[in-house]
Image (cartoon, grey):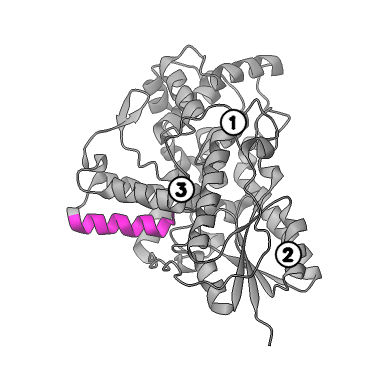
Amino acid sequence: MKPKKILVWFRNDLRLHDNEMLVEAIAKSNEILPVYIFDPRTFQLSVEPPVFKSGNIRTRFLQESVAALRESFQQLGGNLLVLNGHPEDILPDLVEQYDIAEVYHHREVASAETIVSADVEDRLWKIQVNLRHFIGHTLYNKEDLPFPIKDIPDVFAQFKKKTERDAIVKACFLSPEVINFTEVDDWGLIPDLQTLLQVDALVEPIQHELIGGEQAGLQHLSELLAPGAAIYLKIAKTGAGKAGFSSRLSPWLAVGCLSPRMVYWMVKDAEEEHGGHANFNQIILGLLWRDYFRFMLKKHGFTFFEELAEQPAQVLTQAEENSLLEQWKSGATGHGLVDDYMQQLNETGFVTNTGRVLLATYLIYVLKVNWMKGAAYFEEKSIDYAPANNWCNWAIVAGGGKAGHASKSTFNLDKQLKMLDINVSI
């Protein structure tokens, strides 16, 4: 009898730990074929505004994370097949070439990613092969929530209260120790930055503060929670001259090098060993916000942004708006705090949540520039870009979302303007 082969299509889930998709594929097959596909649409240049879908810092972090996953498989006697192209074209060919019985992948919620999944599913269906969906990006599984997706509270405070009270966080799946891999003659090369971004000018020196990959993420988390670390201090520097706490876990969470459940349980272990701390609560709160935004997109789709899409056009001419946008993007607004935060984003790909909200506030309410142009720029520059987090956060700052007046409590415009030391007529 011929062996059953399952193709495991990796996307934003670049880890071995707490990966139900991978564990299930190993259990249900005789051998697996792990695949990662660099989709050129992820790196393309948009026309208006002229920004890349993924800039050099974010792309480098992704390359490192894919390379780290490949190394993990190599240590288990296998490899990761790396290809460049459209998944809906590549995966059906691989299925036929290697006689694959099923394809496993993690389901996404943002429109571009779900369209790709749907196209892959349609193409596989034509050759009578199933695309099986898994959910591995959230702290809480949707089936464990105390309400169906359609009834999830639109107000974050209600979502948090009911979820923490009535749902449980499951234990992590263990990393596999033995895997049988499909034999492949050529496992492919990870494309370089010039190939992926298709322009040399964008490939500039990178301040390499954060390294991609599962082991780098786990090490960062361990060091963050170790006795004597800055997390235990009442004040920890976050950059741009501001004090506060930032875990900087988001880049590894964004590409799935870290599981939200792994972060949660390691924080809980630290709490048990060292006692409770406000910064522990901030980490858990951040995980809940990630869940909330993903579930909002799952529940509402693009209608989450409808209220903003229907707003009247700005009074600025396109030339005026573009000029102000460029000043903001280059950190040349003349406002010291705004420019410091923007320089930090441009140089490192990372800025704290406080900085993000201030940058968005300044662009939307002071410069009067369309919020979507700012969100698109963050998509290019942010090393921790995740569609739900980025676009929903920007929408809330811009006065949108589905929670009505209750959502305004998540964004206090007067407070943000006071932090910017600006008086402006809204």
Q: In which quarter of the image is residue 318?
A: top right
- In the rendered image, which residue does mark 3 sit on? 252
Looking at numbered disc 1 in the image, what kind of residue is underneath it? Tyr
Q: Residues within 10 Å of mark 2 (few under 14, many from 20)?
A: some
Quadrant of the drawing holding the N terminus: bottom right
Seen at 21% across and 38% down, the residue is: 233
Farthest residue in the top direction?
Answer: 334
Q: Is residue 8 left or right of residue 15?
A: right
Helix, strand or loop: magenta stretch:
helix
Residue 67 or 324: which is nearer the viewer? 67
Does label 3 or label 2 sit earlier along the sequence?
A: 2
Residue for badge 2? 94
- For label 1, the crowd category at 10 Å Cα-Cα, with few meaning under 14, some 14 to 19 and many 20 or more, is some
Q: Distance between the residues labelled 1 and 2?
A: 35 Å
Please name the amino acid that badge 3 sits on. Answer: Trp
Residue closer to the observer: 99 or 247: 99
Question: What amino acid type should be assigned to the residue bearing mark 2?
Answer: Leu
- CA–CA distance in space, label 1 to label 3: 20 Å
Inter-mark Cα distance, 3 to 2:
29 Å
Left or right of 358? Residue 202 is: right
Q: Name the residue under label 1.
A: 377
Asked if the residue at tag 2 contacts the one at tag 3, i.e. Cβ–Cβ closer than 8 Å, the answer is no
Q: What x and y, as percent, mark residue 51?
A: 65, 30
Taking depth in this image into account, of 214 and 354 the one nearest to the observer is 214
Q: Which mark is residue 115?
A: none
Is 269 colored magenta in this rendering? yes
Q: Residue furthest right?
A: 126
Q: Residue at 73% of width from left, 50% of height from top?
A: 85
User: Image height check: is 27 above or below 289?
Assistant: below
